[in-house]
C-alpha cells in the first residue's frame, strides 16, 4: 500500500467527497481514529458514503433528521470486513475533527488525517479492521515523515467532552503493537 499525491493507489475504494479544502500548511503530523455507523449500530450500509458525498437521503431513517445540512468527511473509513474507502486526498483538509485541539494546537483538521472505523464505542472492532488499519497507518507513516506512533489519537482525545470515539473498546495495545512489530 503506497500513497501517491495523497491517494492510496491500490487496494482502496475511492469515493470522493466534496467536503474538503486546502490545508493551510501541508503538514500532516497527526492521525485521528474515529468511529461511525449509520444508522447507529448498523453496519454495511451505503449511508456513510452518502453522508460524506453529500447525497444522504434524510428520509431513509428517522435518525438522519439530525444530519440535515451537515457537511463532514474523513480521509478514510475501514469497514467491518476490512475494506478501506478513501474520500479525501491526505494532502487536503477533510472535515472530521471539528472543534479540536492537540498539545495546544487548535483546529486539528489543519494537520491531521482522519480514519473512521465502521463501528460504535461499544462494539468490538474486527480483526480485519485492525489489520487494515495497521497497513494503512504504515503507508501513511512512509508518506508523511512527521507521523509516528506518538502521533496517534482518538477523536475523544482532541475533542474531550464533545466526542467519545473510538470508545474504550478500541484496542490501542493491539494497534500499536502491530505497528511496532512491522516497524522493527
Image (cartoon, rainbow, N blue to C red):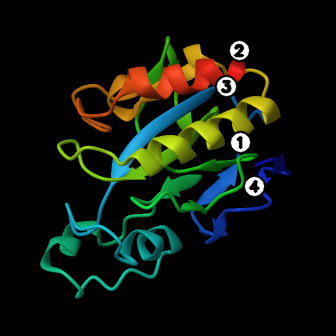
Check disc 1 and report its element: helix, strand or loop: loop
Q: Which mark is residue 182?
A: 3
Estimate the spatial distance between the alpha carbons at disc 1 and disc 2, rounded to whole Å. 32 Å
Label 2 neighbourhood size at 10 Å, few (<14), some (14-19), many (20+)? few
Are the residues tagged 3 and 2 within 8 Å (C-beta)? yes
Are the residues tagged 4 and 2 within 8 Å (C-beta)? no
> Eyeballing the image, is 33 above or below 58?
above
Residue tagged 4: 8
Q: Residue at x 32, y 38 (%)?
A: 166
Estimate the spatial distance between the alpha carbons at disc 1 and disc 3, rounded to whole Å. 30 Å
Residue tagged 2: 184
Q: Which mark is residue 23?
A: 1
Are the residues tagged 4 and 3 within 8 Å (C-beta)? no
Viewer-nearest of discs 4 and 1: 4
Residue 33 % position (x, y) = 45, 37
Estimate the spatial distance between the alpha carbons at disc 4 and disc 2, rounded to whole Å. 23 Å
Residue 126 % position (x, y) = 36, 48
> Eyeballing the image, is 20 above or below 123?
below
Of the numbered discs 1 and 3, the one sitting upstream in the chain is 1
* Location of residue 145 by image quarter: top right
Q: Horizontally, is 88 left or right of 39 in the view?
A: right
Residue 139 % position (x, y) = 73, 39
Viewer-nearest of discs 4 and 3: 3
Of the numbered discs 4 and 1, the one sitting upstream in the chain is 4
Estimate the spatial distance between the alpha carbons at disc 4 and disc 1, rounded to whole Å. 18 Å
Amino acid at each position: 500500500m503506497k500513497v501517491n499525491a495523497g491517494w492510496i493507489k491500490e487496494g482502496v475504494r475511492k469515493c470522493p467527497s466534496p467536503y474538503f479544502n486546502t490545508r493551510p500548511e501541508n503538514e500532516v503530523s497527526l492521525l485521528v481514529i474515529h468511529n461511525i455507523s449509520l444508522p447507529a449500530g448498523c453496519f454495511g450500509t451505503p449511508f456513510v458514503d452518502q453522508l460524506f458525498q453529500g447525497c444522504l437521503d434524510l428520509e431513509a431513517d428517522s435518525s438522519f433528521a439530525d444530519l440535515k445540512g451537515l457537511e463532514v468527511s474523513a480521509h478514510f473509513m475501514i469497514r467491518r470486513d476490512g475494506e478501506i474507502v478513501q474520500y479525501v486526498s491526505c494532502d487536503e483538509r477533510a472535515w472530521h475533527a471539528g472543534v479540536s485541539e492537540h498539545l495546544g494546537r487548535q483546529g486539528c483538521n489543519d494537520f491531521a488525517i482522519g480514519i473512521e472505523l465502521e463501528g460504535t464505542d461499544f462494539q468490538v472492532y474486527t480483526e480485519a479492521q485492525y489489520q487494515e488499519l495497521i497497513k494503512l497507518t504504515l503507508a501513511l507513516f512512509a508518506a508523511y515523515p512527521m507521523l509516528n506512533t506518538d502521533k496517534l489519537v482518538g477523536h475523544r482525545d482532541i475533542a474531550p467532552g464533545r466526542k467519545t470515539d473510538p470508545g474504550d473498546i478500541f484496542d490501542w495495545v493491539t494497534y500499536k503493537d502491530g505497528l511496532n512489530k512491522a516497524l522493527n
